[in-house]
């Protein structure tokens, strides 16, 4: 246990550091449901669509389908 860590109670993954957590989460999401290296530029809730900077768009089934990461 590392007492000098930012949160000594958090158990860091044995491999790949904390990035390994997000890699494991991403592996559970079907690739057709992910958008990377593009920016969400418009959400049309009444029309249930989302538009991206790369020109692609997608239908939104529910508001829960939208997740923003920084």
Image (cartoon, rainbow, N blue to C red):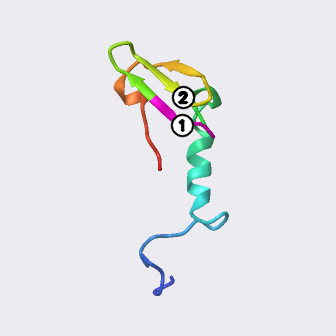
Q: Which residue is found at the position 44% from the left and 27% from the top?
A: 42
For the magenta stretch, what is the residue range? 37-41
Secondary element at tag 1:
loop
Foreground residue among 48 and 27: 48
Residue 40 counted in the magenta span: yes
The answer to which of marks 2 and 1 sits earlier in the sequence is 1
* Crowding near the residue tagged with mark 1, few <14, some 14–19, many ≥20 C-alpha atoms within 10 Å: few
Q: Which residue is mark 2?
A: 52
Foreground residue among 51 and 62: 51
Q: Which residue is found at the position 41% from the left and 74% from the top?
A: 9
Quarter of the rendering containing residue 16: bottom right
Q: Is residue 48 above or below residue 2?
A: above
The image shows residue 22 at horizontal and vertical percentages of 56, 52
The span from disc 2 to disc 1 (Cα, nearest Å) is 5 Å
Do labels 2 and 1 touch, CB within 8 Å?
yes
Q: Which residue is mark 1?
A: 39
Q: Is residue 29 above or below residue 12?
A: above
Residue extending farthest right: 15
Q: Is residue 47 left or right of residue 70?
A: left
Quarter of the rendering containing residue 37: top right
């Amino acid at each position: 246990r590392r007492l000098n860590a930012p949160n000594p109670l958090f158990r860091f993954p044995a491999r790949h550091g904390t990035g390994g957590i997000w890699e494991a989460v991403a592996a559970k999401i079907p690739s057709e449901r992910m958008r990377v290296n593009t920016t969400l530029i418009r959400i049309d809730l009444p029309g249930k669509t989302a538009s991206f900077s790369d020109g692609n768009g997608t239908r939104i089934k529910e508001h829960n389908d939208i997740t923003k990461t920084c």
